[in-house]
Image: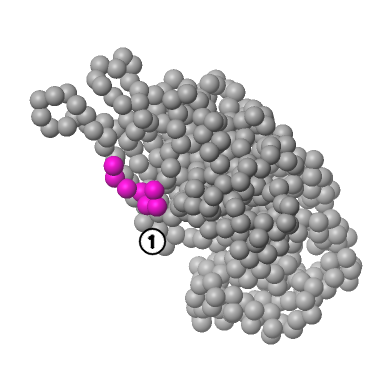
Amino acid sequence: MTTARSDAFVFFGATGDLAYRQIFPALQALTRQGHLELPVIGVARSGWSLDQFRERARDSLAQHGTVDAATFDRLAARLRYISGDYHDGSTYEQLRRALGSASRPLHYLAIPPGMFEPVTRGLAASSCAAGARVIVEKPFGRDLASAQGLDRTLLARFAEDAIFRIDHYLGKEAVENLLYFRFANTFLEPVWHRGHVANVQFTMAEAFGVQGRGAFYDEVGTIRDVVQNHLLQMLALLTMEPPLDGGPDAIRDEKLRVLRAVRPVAPAEAVRGQFRGYREVAGVRADSQVETFAALRLHVDNARWRGVPFYIRAGKCLPVTCTEVTVELKPPSPAIFDIPGDGQSNYFRFRLSPDVAITIGARTKVPGEPMGGTATALVARCHAGSEMTPYERLLGDALRGDAALFTRGDTIEAAWRVVDPILNDAVPVTPYEPATWGPPSASHLLAAGNRWHDPAPQEVLP
């Protein structure tokens, strides 16, 4: 894999929503740090002038951050703009001229997947793909077959190690902390397996609905939106074997290995829900069968995790907005003290949002003569400080050629294999009331003695 730094940044869809919300703020941050000393070329179909494009960038920063006048002036001086049709070869001829002597451009396709074919074809025909890297946004397909089709399109013009599939969730500081905490602490390894872990739960809850995104969400749903990508990537980080080293391929090899060990979800081990009122949202079909809630029971069929149930739960209009993972440990054996079997004895809880904390649950003796105990939590809180945004981190990594936080094509296919059996209405949708934890049938997925750990609005001591 080449790690030579890119010498130009090109982003297609430069007048779109993603560029407005995420890319321009990330570009200003990289400029401030001195990491963007190269041409920045926007390509879009809007017939704008360069001055209009620069004003769009300024407005983006005013709405989604802060305009740093000195830094913005440096960024604006590097901006170029090409207006053209993605199907027209002259658009790519303009781009080739704008690149000048740049020989290692980074192309960001902030466009729908249906446009990957004409854009990559145009880049190759104009020699803009030679020596280049390309970033593509999720969704990486709608199912396994379409994901494989997208890969064939990309691999026809770019080598695998030049393709950076961006999942912004992997650029979050809290998600990176999962990987670091897992492998930087020796006390975890003796208990991090089926002999001590009773179950693992992933919850990604949002208290809000889909207002303003009804048409988009009605084409995607919860499983495609966050389960197949964000949540399965988190599962891989917590369950994979130790990589040979900290290099990107070693880490991604182990993520692939564990995802291939995850059994495809049977329809009987999934619940799909839809909050009441969803079909009244603008852009949503009146007879929509798209899920706004999903709960799954997963099995990792390898020596470390065989027999341990993994539960995933995600949805809209739930009681809180929160993402956390709870790893519940088995009770001591033999149990010489009276310990309640409520899942609150020994556990690890990784709180990823809205606040960030790692909690270790233990039991300590209460004062007095009886040998009674109480639940105690050891909480390590993380303060954001100067935390980078996910796009700032990921764009900087891609410019350097560091692929560690990007997803490889074989790993994406492995994740699609897990959820493919429950797509396309294989599991009926059950209505649920807003501000509840989804359909009551989600509790039926739990093994005997297990219960859902409902997150509190903030990490609190017991």
**195 displayed left or right of 113:** left
Q: Quadrant of residue 40?
A: bottom right
- Residue 363, x across and y down, in percent: 26, 31
Q: Is residue 196 visible?
A: yes
Residue annotated with mark 1: 385
Nearest the camera: 103 or 451?
451
Does the magenta segment cover residue 457?
yes
Residue ID at (55%, 31%): 445
Disc 1: CA contacts within 10 A as few (<14), some (14-19) or many (>=20): few
- Quadrant (top left/top right/bottom left/bottom right) for the N terminus: top right
Judge whether 46 appears above or below 3 on screen. Answer: below
Q: Nearer the viewer, residue 46 or 313?
A: 313
Residue 403 in view in this figure: no
Residue 341 spot, x, y in % from top left: 35, 26
Position of residue 283 in the picture relative to residue 30 (left or right): right
x and y percentages locating residue 112 in the rendered image: 75, 59
Using the image as rendered, state which of residue 205 and residue 274 is in the foreground.
274
Disc tally is: 1
Apparent side of residue 439 relative to residue 120 in the rendered image (left or right): left
For residue 385, what is the image quadrant?
A: bottom left
Q: Quadrant of residue 417?
A: top right
Tell me which residue sits at (59%, 51%) in the image: 275
- Report the residue at 49% width, 76% height from top: 66
Q: Nearer the viewer, residue 104 or 181?
A: 181
Magenta residues, start to end: 456-462
* Residue 414 covered by magenta stretch: no
- Considering the image in quadrants, where does the C terminus appear? top left
Q: In the image, is 413 to the left or to the right of 346?
A: right
Amino acid type at circle 1 is: Gly
Secondary structure at numbered mark 1? loop
Q: Position of residue 400 (x, y in %)?
A: 61, 56
Decide whether the magenta segment is chiefly helix, strand or loop.
loop
